[in-house]
Image: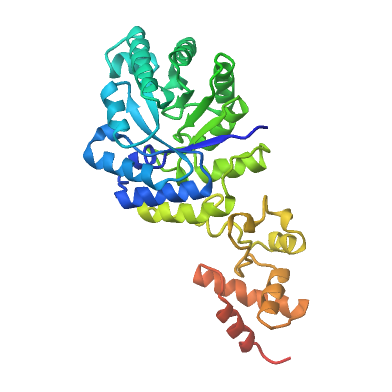
């Protein structure tokens, strides 16, 4: 498949997660890490929120050297002016397209949506801006109107259209079909923006890419409103290993980026978090450890070195002789299979009591306590 461009919205949609509030310095630091990692576009925030947000978006625009920096806007010329004042050269102009949101949230109709779209997109283009037309709540909208919105966006000069599963109600099969349907109806690129309310954000993002989306929206660690968004690190690795595509993102930069964002949000990374969890290459089960010692690909989808992590064989309740012998050998202790089997009985009992694996020091001490042969 062709390359996919990543539009990361950690600094906008990600920060909208309850309890998350980045300082201006943190926004700039995250933006620089995203830029260094190779992300194509960074959605920096919503300047219309006020002076503090304008200053933060301005800092991001000044700090980033390579990636395109964009700002999010309602379909209002005043919002676009606020974005222009920050120095960004790209904007998202967002409007609801579902009947429920248009009527209940805005108290408007479809004609009003199309008029606001035309006015705001044309205004942004007259200012020399790159424009993404965001179709909020695309997944719950009449798809005929989504297509009409997309064609109107194209006619007004928008550079791409954002298909948004705003409340995460799609499954991958439906996502593929809807994005494919949209992608063939316009000549401008489609971006897929997914949410994780049913735990399907990454799967739906990949399905959207399969359906023809050439831009994908992500957040670091999947942070975002409610259950969050498609996780940058998951999408990047899955595009590479499962879809055979490229994103231009440096896989070795993912762990450091995620750890910084985790610290800034006060949300520690779970040890089993896909791609960046510190224990995802820890193999304790005896069968698995033995397999990995013989051939790592037996139980690893990709090598830990690819993302800057390490493979470990912790010794605990589920360990087997092969892993124990291997671990002790690295500590300068040689046991035969019979001795290792006897030691395992003690290892398992101690591990159950401790509710964890044994450290190297505990293993060495345990070996030293065994009666001489």
Q: Which residue appears farthest toward the bottom when viewing the image?
A: 372
Quarter of the image for residue 373 reads bottom right
Q: Is residue 235 visible?
A: yes
The location of residue 320, given as percent across then percent down, is: 69, 68
User: Number of marks in the image?
Assistant: 0
Lateral position of residue 358 relative to residue 162, left or right: right
- Tell me if 49 is positioned left or right of 150 in this view: left
Task: Identify the image quadrant of residue 115.
Answer: top left
Q: Position of residue 60 (x, y in %)?
A: 37, 44
Percent position (x, y) of residue 17?
Answer: 35, 41
Residue positioned 46% across, 14% down in the render: 146
Quarter of the rendering occupied by the N terminus: top right
Q: Residue furthest top?
A: 111
Say if 65 sits above or below 268 in the image: above
The vertical placement of 142 against 253, above or below, is above
User: Which residue occupies the foreground of this view, 145 or 116?
Assistant: 116
Which residue is painted at 77% across and 62% down in the image?
A: 294
Across and down, in percent, residue 344 comes to 66, 74
Q: Is residue 223 left or right of residue 185?
A: left
Q: Residue at x 41, y 43 (%)?
A: 223
Q: Is residue 235 above or below residue 144?
A: below
Front in this rendered view, residue 127 or 93: 127
Q: Residue at x 35, y 42 (%)?
A: 15
Residue 270 visible from this viewpoint: no
Query: 34 above or below 286?
Result: above
Instruction: Give the farthest residue toward the left.
Output: 51
Here the colouring is: rainbow
């Amino acid at each position: 498949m062709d390359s996919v461009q990543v539009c990361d919205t950690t600094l906008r949609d990600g920060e909208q997660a309850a309890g998350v509030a980045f300082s201006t310095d943190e926004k700039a630091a995250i933006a620089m890490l995203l830029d260094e990692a190779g992300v194509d576009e960074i959605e920096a925030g919503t300047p219309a929120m006020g002076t503090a947000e304008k200053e933060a978006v301005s800092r991001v625009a000044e700090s980033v050297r390579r990636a395109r920096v964009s700002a999010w806007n309602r379909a209002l010329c005043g919002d676009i002016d606020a974005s222009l004042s920050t120095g960004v050269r790209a904007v998202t102009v967002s409007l609801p397209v579902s009947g429920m949101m248009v009527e209940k949230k805005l108290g408007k109709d479809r004609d009003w949506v199309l008029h606001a779209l035309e006015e705001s997109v044309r205004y942004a283009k007259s200012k020399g801006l790159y424009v993404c037309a965001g179709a909020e709540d695309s997944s719950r909208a009449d798809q005929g109107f989504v297509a009409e919105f997309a064609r109107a966006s194209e006619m007004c000069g928008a550079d791409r259209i954002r298909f948004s599963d705003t409340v995460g109600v799609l499954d991958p099969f439906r996502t593929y079909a809807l994005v494919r349907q949209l992608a063939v109806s316009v000549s401008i690129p489609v971006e897929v923006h997914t949410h994780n309310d049913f735990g399907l954000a990454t799967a739906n993002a990949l399905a959207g890419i399969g359906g023809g989306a050439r831009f994908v929206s992500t957040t670091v660690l999947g942070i975002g409103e409610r259950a969050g968004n498609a996780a940058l690190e998951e999408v990047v690795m899955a595009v590479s290993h499962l879809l055979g595509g490229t994103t231009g993102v440096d896989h070795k930069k993912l762990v450091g980026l995620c750890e910084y964002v985790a610290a800034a949000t006060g949300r520690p990374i779970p040890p089993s978090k896909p791609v960046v969890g510190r224990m995802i290459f820890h193999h304790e089960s005896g069968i698995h450890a033995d397999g990995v010692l013989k051939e790592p690909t037996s139980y690893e989808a990709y090598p830990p070195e690819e993302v800057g992590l390490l493979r470990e064989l912790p010794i605990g309740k589920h360990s087997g002789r092969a892993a124990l012998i291997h671990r002790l050998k690295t500590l300068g202790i040689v046991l035969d299979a019979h001795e290792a089997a006897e030691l395992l009985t003690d290892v398992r009992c101690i591990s159950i009591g401790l509710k964890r694996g044994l450290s190297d020091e505990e293993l060495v001490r345990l070996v030293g306590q065994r009666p001489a042969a």
